[in-house]
Amino acid sequence: MTSCSRSGCRGRIMATGFCDTCGRQAPPDPAPPPDTGLDAPVSQRTERSRRAPKPAFPGVGELDQHGLVVLPEVAPPEDPLDDDPQPPTGGRRCGANGCSMIIGVGYGGQPPRADGRCPRCGTPYSFRPQLHAGDLVADHYAILGCLAQGGLGWVYLAEDTRVTGYRVVLKGLINVHDALARRTAVEERRSLTELHHPDIVRIVTYAEHALAGQSPTGYLVMDYIGGRSLRDLFAADDADRLFQGRPRLDHVLTYGCKILGALQYMHERGLLYCDMKPANVIHFGRGIKVIDLGAVRAVNDRTSAYVYTSAFAPPPEEVEARGWHVDSDLYTVGVTLQVLAGATERAPGLAGDSFDRLVARATHAEPRARFRSAAEMSRQLWEVLREFRALRFGEQLPERSTRFRATDASLDAGLGAIPALGHWTDRPHGHLSALDVSPPSAAEVAAALPQPVPDPDDGAALLLDAFEPDAPDRVAEQRRRSSRLGTPETALWLCRAYLRCGEPDRAEQSLAEAETQLGERQAPYDWRIAWHRGVLHLSKGKVRAAGACFARVYRALPGEYVPKLALGYCAEQDREASVARPVTFYEAVWKRDFAHAPAAFGLARCHLAAGERDEAVRVLDDVPTTSRHHDAARIAAVRIRTGALHGRPPSVADLRDAALRLPELRLDGGAAEGESRARLVAEVRETVLAHWPEQGWGAQYPVGPVFGAGHQDSLRGLLEQSFRQLAGQARTAGEHGRLLDLAHAVRPMTTF
């Protein structure tokens, strides 16, 4: 993805063509020479604008250049015509001279009539198709038959007699006397004429056709999209063949990203779609088209009647009270995706839950809790898609967060660190320390969790990066003098800074100021407030309260990995309060990118808590060499192989593996006798010797420079040397004496 060109924005341009951070559209590419392309089929004209997909993993589907799934090829239906077009059910509004009577409804148990007169005003009506095979519209559109009935009119398939093999769709009105329907048709014509997007149906022209004795009827002439609606496709008998099995969630997410790209394009132009549903999205070839723009309205239109499908729309009382907004369009997308997902196979791991949370936010009963833009929703959808692919197919899909900055911390709780001298000098006599697999402290996690990226629309966002993070009082003083710093981002910056300085009370005050500035209508739905509240709770050791706050962030940002990392830690500390196991959260982060060291160490601890050494080592071995925590992961693997886990000593296989790993560790700048290596080897030898009487180790014992010649006295001699080396590292006489005592205690028995 390319970087956003907007000044001060650090986002990137998504597959939708909009920035993942500020939501603005990318500048258009230089336009190619005009090409009507009427000499080629529609599918070929569309494919010209598409780049070749990039293969991912054979057998599991390909990903295109934007990270979306390459959709299956859907051929045009052989016979798309409706041989027996039936009038619409449920009746229609009369509309003649403003008449609101519903016509075409059966009474007294009788079926509805396709023709008749309005019982109230007497205006004649007919719901039958007005065009038939063989009719010629505008002198060159030969009608082939009726395709279907749209929300306001019949849809006909025609052939352009001036361009061989080129088919178009004509859409007219079911009830030509309905003034509202005519006005809506005009709006649709205007909207379609202005829209040029690869995923929105293209209008060709507008034509009129007069029947004998009637006024001319206007018809929209559009490209024929030779495919199937998502409603029909997901219910088709051959869906399993097309998708090579049941449709998967990543297919649904790909549809969603494409739909949202089309809607964002419309929203940027001041238009609302209003009637998104599976029936209004056509899958053709390997792409989609959003069709039936009859319900489109201007964003600022508060007078014309709303046209929408109630099963996919916000509650009628909401529409009546506040009208239709961008979040209302996103609501319909959420329901559409939920319906499509009902036909898919169960998503693995946390991906299904992330998708459910995404739908829940899009369709939240409180509009202020919904996504603010199609671009914002699309980014989260795309992230959930990557999570699904990682968990389902094991694909590594590294991508930086757009909402949080990276962190340098590993949160390994010392597992990947070389033991300090205090490991021996500070412990009671005769006590051998077991392998510590406990999670890091709450305060350590609070200090290490990634920080949110400042809102680029906040006036102080750029200024805050220039301030020293350890001088909050100076910033607070400047904030009182400068109105430019009187923003929510400044208050949140101060909250983090005071926490870093160990002043939780002042951090709490700054967070309260941020809430005040956001206002009581916005603050409860701003995920940044919930995040900082969670970090504050963690700093005070209130893990359960922190988990509840991070869960709110997860609901708002279901595709982001950072909230899942925080929830994994909270679940690790407080398993009774968590709704999911910590391993579920950690896996969702780690499997997307093995370089996420906090998730790798968290997942390793979960395996160790279950007594699974091999699984823990396998996770740490996957931390890539490019990660700054690669060496810590390798050290941790050695300690896991040789440590006493829950009172159980390592196996011979563990020792043999550790013997191979130790020489490969990059310690002390490569020095063979460095201080760090000496301490790690001493820990390993001490653990093995402590369990020698009960283990015996046997013939498979790894003989060599680390573990000796295969008998206890040999290992004792090596461990004595290790302790004498550590004594040379001592900083005090007490440390030196304690380490020499340990050396004397383990030396082999000698006879004279």
Image (spheres, rainbow, N blue to C red):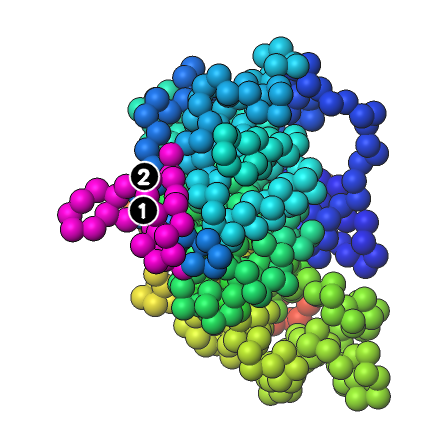
Q: Is residue 125 magenta?
A: yes
> Which residue does the numbered mark 2 point to in the structure image?
114
Considering the numbered disc 2 on the image, is that residue within a helix, a strand or a loop?
loop
Q: Residue furthest front?
A: 213
> Which class describes the residues within 10 Å of circle 2: few (<14), some (14-19), or many (20+)?
some
748 relative to 409, above or below: above
Residue 750 in the image, given as x and y percentages of width and height = 45, 47
For the N terminus, the image quarter is top right
341 relative to 327, above or below: above
Name which residue type carries label 2. Ala
Looking at the image, is mark 1 or mark 2 earlier in the sequence? 1
Q: Residue at x 38, y 39 (%)?
A: 127
Q: Residue at x 51, y 52 (%)?
A: 179
Q: Report, in whole angstroms, how far the alpha carbon at label 1 lies from the one at label 2.
A: 6 Å
Question: Can you tell which mark lies on residue 495?
Answer: none
Q: Are marks 1 and 2 in contact (CB under 8 Å)?
A: yes
Left or right, 185 with reference to 6: left
Residue 606 in the image, given as x and y percentages of width and height = 40, 52
Name which residue type carries label 1. Gly
> Which class describes the residues within 10 Å of circle 1: few (<14), some (14-19), or many (20+)?
many
Tell which of 724 and 387 is nearer to you: 387
Left or right, 674 with reference to 231: right
Total marks placed: 2
* Stretch of the chain drawn in magenta: 100-128
Tell which of 243 and 528 is nearer to you: 243
> Which residue does the numbered mark 1 point to in the structure image?
104
Main secondary structure type of the part rendered in magenta: loop
Tell which of 376 and 278 is nearer to you: 278
